[in-house]
């Protein structure tokens, strides 16, 4: 089940306003060009920012997302009509012979069990053409990013059109490595409503990710650093065998 942040019709429209800086997507756009991709699959596309950026640049794009509320936001964006939207999880990924598949942000870490992660990899493998690339990021466990997920470090505020001022912050609920659970709280100034969204991510080390990719029929072409978060994430570039 998708987290409330993505699935709740009142929370999903806040996502872009509370996190407006999407410079993290620039390297993915650059790699789409670098690899000469024409058809791109965006798995866990969320509110569709990256899919619409690709569509604007003339790519043939398929966006897959399990949260209907997020897809509703995505479909309202400029160039959304050029994207093929699919409502479903990784098992709903269509076999489209894509040149490139991506999982941006935390998508690769929401698969908590080895079984779910392996199933997702096999579905992505089936959607790519032979030689197609799969690119995704995952946080380096040794950095222990969750230690900075406190209210003081994460508090943000936005004046959302039609909603008013919303304040949001994150707090860790439980650390049971490699799993980390945390809660985002959203306070609406207009009516005093407070909503929460709980999430859990799995922090896999580089060797485990590498082995899982090879087992699913990929060769690891490269492991890059995230330009906007140097030293904090692995960016895997894998090729379908």
Image (tube, rainbow, N blue to C red):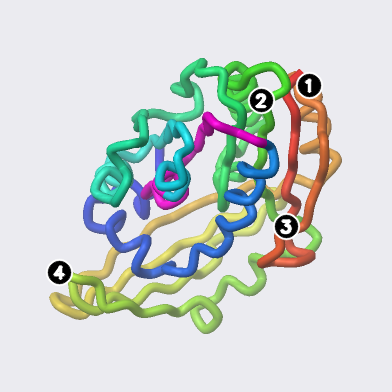
Image coordinates for residue 189, horizontal then vertical, percent: 21, 80
Q: Are marks 2 and 1 in contact (CB under 8 Å)?
A: yes
Q: Which residues are magenta?
A: 36-52
Within the magenta stretch, is there residue 206? no
* Closer to viewer: mark 3 or mark 2: 3
Mark with earlier residue (4, 3) = 4
Residue 41, percent from left and from top = 51, 32
How far is the residue under mark 4 from the one under mark 3? 36 Å
Left or right of 225 on screen, residue 19? left
Image position of 48 (left or right of 219): left
Q: Quadrant of the N terminus?
A: top left
Quarter residue 239 falls in: top right
Q: Between marks 2 and 4, how big is the CA–CA gap?
A: 41 Å
Which residue lies at the image location 82% right of the left edge and 35% below the top edge? 221
Q: Earlier in the sequence, mark 1 or mark 4?
A: 4
Q: Which residue is mark 2?
A: 118
- Say which residue label 1 marks: 215
**How far apart in space, not on screen, are marks 2 and 1 (Cα)?**
8 Å
Q: Which residue is at the front of the view, 98 or 162?
A: 98
Q: x, y (%) of residue 207?
A: 86, 40
Using the image, tell me which numbered label, if any, was put on residue 233.
Answer: 3
**SS label for mark 4:** loop
Q: Which residue is mark 4?
A: 162
């Amino acid at each position: 089940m998708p987290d409330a942040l993505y699935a709740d019709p009142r929370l999903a429209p806040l996502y872009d306003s509370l996190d407006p800086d999407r410079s993290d997507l620039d390297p993915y756009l650059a790699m789409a060009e670098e690899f000469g991709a024409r058809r791109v699959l965006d798995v866990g596309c969320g509110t569709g920012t990256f899919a619409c950026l690709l569509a604007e640049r003339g790519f043939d794009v398929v966006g897959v997302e399990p949260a209907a509320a997020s897809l509703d936001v995505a479909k309202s964006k400029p160039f959304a009509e050029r994207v093929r939207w699919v409502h479903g999880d990784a098992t709903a990924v269509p076999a489209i012979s894509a040149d490139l598949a991506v999982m941006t942000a935390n998508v690769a870490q929401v698969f908590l069990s080895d079984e779910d992660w392996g199933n997702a990899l096999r579905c992505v493998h089936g959607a790519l053409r032979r030689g197609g690339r799969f690119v995704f990021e995952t946080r380096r466990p040794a950095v222990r990013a969750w230690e900075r997920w406190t209210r003081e470090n994460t508090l943000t505020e936005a004046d959302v059109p039609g909603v008013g001022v919303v304040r949001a912050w994150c707090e860790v609920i439980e650390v049971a490595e490699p799993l980390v659970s945390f809660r985002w709280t959203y306070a609406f100034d207009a009516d005093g409503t407070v909503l929460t969204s709980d999430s859990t991510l799995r922090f896999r080390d580089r060797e485990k990710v590498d082995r899982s990719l090879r087992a699913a029929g990929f060769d690891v072409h490269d492991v890059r650093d995230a330009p906007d978060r140097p030293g904090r994430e692995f960016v895997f570039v894998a090729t379908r065998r």
